[in-house]
Image: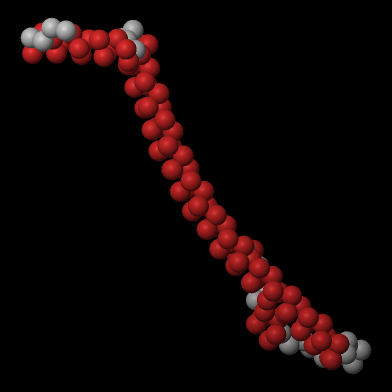
């Protein structure tokens, strides 16, 4: 992801050769500075890899939690719908259903209380 935007690798920096002029920079200072750049660049690359890995793990966790949320919501909606279907849509509550069952048993089994 980020690697496409980077022009140099730590190895490119390490292998860089400069032309030496009579009035050029001190080679030791340039080398020391480039060594610091290489260390920073290497650290940045390791940070980027770690963050990309963390992002991947968190995205997977997020997808799992979204899926679990959908399943639980479906169970709750189903339970609510069936509860509403038993009591309000048919006009029956638990007592009414028990009375009906009792009356049906009396008819089927011929029992009279």
Q: Is any atom of residue 7 visible in this view?
A: no
Where is residue 1 shown, x and y percent of the image? 58, 61
Q: Is residue 101 left or right of residue 72?
A: left
25 in relation to 3, above or below: below
| Quadrant location of the C terminus in the rendered image | top left
Quarter residue 38 falls in: bottom right
28 in relation to 34, above or below: below
Q: Is any atom of residue 20 visible in this view?
A: yes
Q: Is residue 70 left or right of residue 49?
A: left
User: In front: 99, or 55?
Assistant: 99
Quarter residue 93 falls in: top left
Residue at the location (42% across, 30% down)? 76
Residue at the location (7% across, 9% down)? 110
Q: How is the image coloured?
A: secondary structure
User: In front: 25, or 23?
Assistant: 25
**Residue furthest to the right:** 23
Where is residue 60 shown, x and y percent of the image? 49, 53
Residue at the location (74% across, 75% down)? 40
């Amino acid at each position: 992801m980020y690697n496409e935007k980077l022009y140099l690798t730590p190895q490119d920096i390490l292998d860089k050769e400069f032309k030496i002029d009579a009035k050029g920079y001190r080679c030791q200072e340039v080398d020391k500075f480039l060594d610091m750049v290489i260390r920073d660049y290497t650290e940045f690359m390791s940070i980027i890899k770690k963050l990309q890995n963390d992002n991947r793990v968190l995205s997977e966790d997020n997808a799992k939690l979204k899926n679990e949320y959908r399943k639980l919501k479906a169970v709750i909606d189903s339970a609510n719908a069936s509860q509403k279907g038993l009591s309000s849509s048919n006009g029956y509550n638990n007592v009414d259903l028990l009375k009906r069952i009792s009356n049906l048993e009396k008819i089927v089994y011929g029992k009279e209380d």
